[in-house]
Each structure stands twice: as C-alpha cells, then as structure tokens.
Image (tube, rainbow, N blue to C red):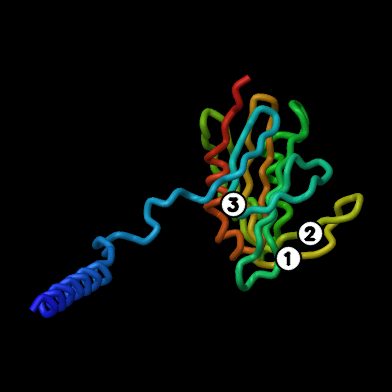
Amino acid sequence: MRKSKSIFVIAAILITVAMLIGCSSSEKPKQEAGETPGAGMPKAPRFHGNVAGVSWSFPNTWTVAPEKPMRSATYIVQPVSGDSDSAECAIYYFGSSSGGGKQANLERWASQFEQSDGKPSMEHAIMKEESVNGLPVSTIDLKGAYLVASGPMMQVSGKKEGYRLLGAIVEGPQGSIFFKMTGPEKTMTATESDFREMVASLQAQSL
C-alpha cells in the first residue's frame, strides 16, 4: 500500500514539473505594438577635430587620412554601391589673415566645376549664410563635372562627371576655416547629412 502511495506521489510531482517547464518555455517576451527593435539605442560615436579656436565632430564611419600639406585634416568616405571613387572632406586653415575672402573662395570652388549647359557654375550653386553656435558660416552646394587639378601650377588634368561639392567657410575667432567635401553624387548624397551635422557641431572653443 505504501509502495503504491509513493509511486502516486512521485508521478504527481513529475506531472507538475512538466507543466511548469511547458509554461516557462512558451512565455517569451513580446514586442510592443509600434516598438522598433533597437529603438532608443544611442547614435554611433562621433570623433572630434579642432583648429584655430574652432572645434567640430564627425562620424566614426569617416576615415582620417594621413597629414597632407596645407591641410588641417582630411577625411575619406568610402564609395557607395555604383560609385568607384570615394568622397573626400578637406579642412584648411591658412592663418588669421590669409586664405582670401569667403566670396573669392566660393567662386574659386565653383570654378572647379563645369556645367553641361555651359553656364558659370556660380549660377547653379546653392549658397547660404547662417549662424552656427554664434559663428558666421557660408555654405555652398554644387553639382557638375569636377575639373581635377594637379602639378605644381595646379593645372586641369582631368574631368570627373557626376560630382558634387559641399562646402562651408567658418569665420572663427582666429580666422576663416574652410571645409570642402567633393565626391561622386551618390556617395555625397549618402553622406550629406553627416557633413551637415559636422557643420552644425561647429563651436568656438573657450580660452
């Protein structure tokens, strides 16, 4: 009799354990309606640069290139599918009273592009004047055929169709700083928001 009772108790325990295991395995967390996986995750970290009393941030997807003459920094953006060339963002600072005026530099940048309708590129350029964290900034956005310059006299040595320029000239406390980004249109469009975020991050450094 005792043996039968013990068998019954053991069987009851086993059944209860099996039911508990079944419930726990079927109750998985559910995604709330409208919830996006990964929502609320912080943005990818950004790196920082500075020159002549002005600082900025840029995405960690950009590659910092080795030092080049006349440049404070150079960033490389890998080409997107369909483009063979990478995009390049060059930052220049020539001193407190060097580098020329902003209008002259905007016109010089525009002259490095050629338009299919034969009109001057300045007529196609989209230019804006704005204030970023108290700093005067002039921007330019231009598309066309990019005239590649090389050699000691920087003469035109080639032409790259379907290129785009995004530029910004910042009037900093120690002089103007020039941000010039060029590359094939698709790659430039893909990284346009990154460039504009960099410009929006410009700040004068406290002494």
Left or right, 184 with reference to 19: right
* Residue 191, percent from left and from top: 57, 56
Picture residue at 84% right of the left edge, 62% below the top: 157
Disc 2 to disc 3: CB gap under 8 Å: no
On residue 160, the disc is: 1
Amino acid at circle 2:
Val
Q: Judge whether residue 40 can be spotted in this image.
A: yes
SS for tag 2? strand
Work out how far the residue at label 1 is from the one at label 3, CA to CA, in angstroms. 17 Å
Please say if 8 is above or below 187: below
Crowding around mark 3 (Cα neighbors within 10 Å: few <14, some 14 to 19, many 20+) is: some
Residue annotated with mark 3? 141
Picture residue at 74% right of the left edge, 35% below the top: 93
Residue annotated with mark 2? 148
Left or right, 1 with reference to 25: left
Left or right, 85 with reference to 155: left
* Residue 49, percent from left and from top: 65, 38
In primary-sequence order, the first of circles 2 and 1 is 2
Please state which of residues 111 and 8 is positioned toward the viewer in this rendering: 8
